[in-house]
Amino acid sequence: ASKAFVRISDIPSEAERLGIRPGPSKPAFLALISLWQGDITTLEVDAIVNAADEALLGGGGVDGAIHRAAGAQLLEACRAHHGCKTGQAKITPGFNLPAKHVIHTVGPIGEKPDLLASAYRESLSLAKANGVHTIAFPCISAGVFGYPAESACKVAVHTVAKWTNENPGSIDRVVFCLFNQKSVHVYEEEIKRFLKKE
Ligand code: ADP
């Protein structure tokens, strides 16, 4: 079945969506991020991030969806990496996906904020090293790995904000790709809290 691909230019940044003009620190972050509800395998971005496990051989959830959409070559490319430790990341081509690359990262099982933050940072560093300017993340660890969605979202937003501040000009857009309406709401609330804090 052919899926409609979604271009990054069709996804507004949070600054656009909220009608906020880019200014000092906080709005700069808003111009950089987007929330988008749907299937990450449809996104035409430089890289999508896979919430993989240490074996890097595919699985359920978003991992299964990415492998199905990318085709069998993705598994071969993953095998060549011989696994990936929790908190680390590996890169492969996107094969049949509209995304050029897949960055496979392994989030922690359960609520371990340092390892989850590491998964985001390592993914972003690998993106930067590979000339990736647009990247989409699922809510890593928040599915079968059992990380509570609210706290996983908090780590995601804060880690991406800090990294993009420290690495200006490398990544143009980070899409938080959420599978359901509830997750979108969780991210919206976290972004509001985050903006009030600074
Ligand atoms: P983990 O093992 O890291 O918990 P899961 O795939 O079980 O990974 O879940 C991570 C998140 O990805 C969950 O919030 C889940 O709802 C979401 N998800 C599942 N399929 C997709 C998809 N096709 N696109 C985007 N997000 C997805």
Image (cartoon, rainbow, N blue to C red):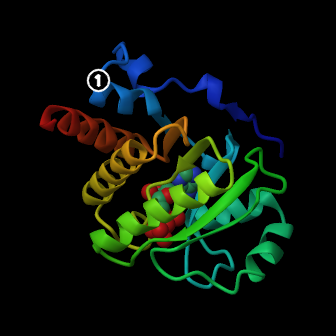
On the rendered structure, is 37 left or right of 18?
right
On the rendered structure, is 161 left or right of 13?
left
On the rendered structure, is 22 left or right of 49?
left
Q: Residues within 10 Å of mark 1 (few under 14, many from 20)?
A: few
Q: Is mark 1 within 8 Å of ligand 1?
A: no
Along the line of sight, which residue is nearer the eye, 104 or 167? 167
SS at badge 1: loop
Does 69 sit above or below residue 27?
below
Residue at image point 47% right, 79% down: 86
Residue at image point 83% right, 42% down: 2
Does 61 sit above or below residue 95?
below
Along the line of sight, which residue is nearer the eye, 171 or 58? 171
Residue at image point 68% right, 32% down: 6
Q: x and y percent of residue 74 in the render?
A: 79, 68
Does 117 sit above or below residue 185?
below
Residue at image point 33% right, 15% down: 20
The answer to whether residue 91 of the structure is visible from this angle is: yes
Q: x and y percent of residue 15 in the render?
A: 39, 22
Q: Which residue is mark 1?
A: 24
Q: x and y percent of residue 1 in the render?
A: 83, 46
**Residue at the extreme left:** 197
The answer to whether residue 72 of the structure is visible from this angle is: no
Q: Quadrant of the C terminus?
A: top left
Q: Total marks drawn? A: 1
On the rendered structure, is 190 left or right of 33?
left
Residue type marked 1: Pro
Q: x and y percent of residue 135 in the render?
A: 58, 45
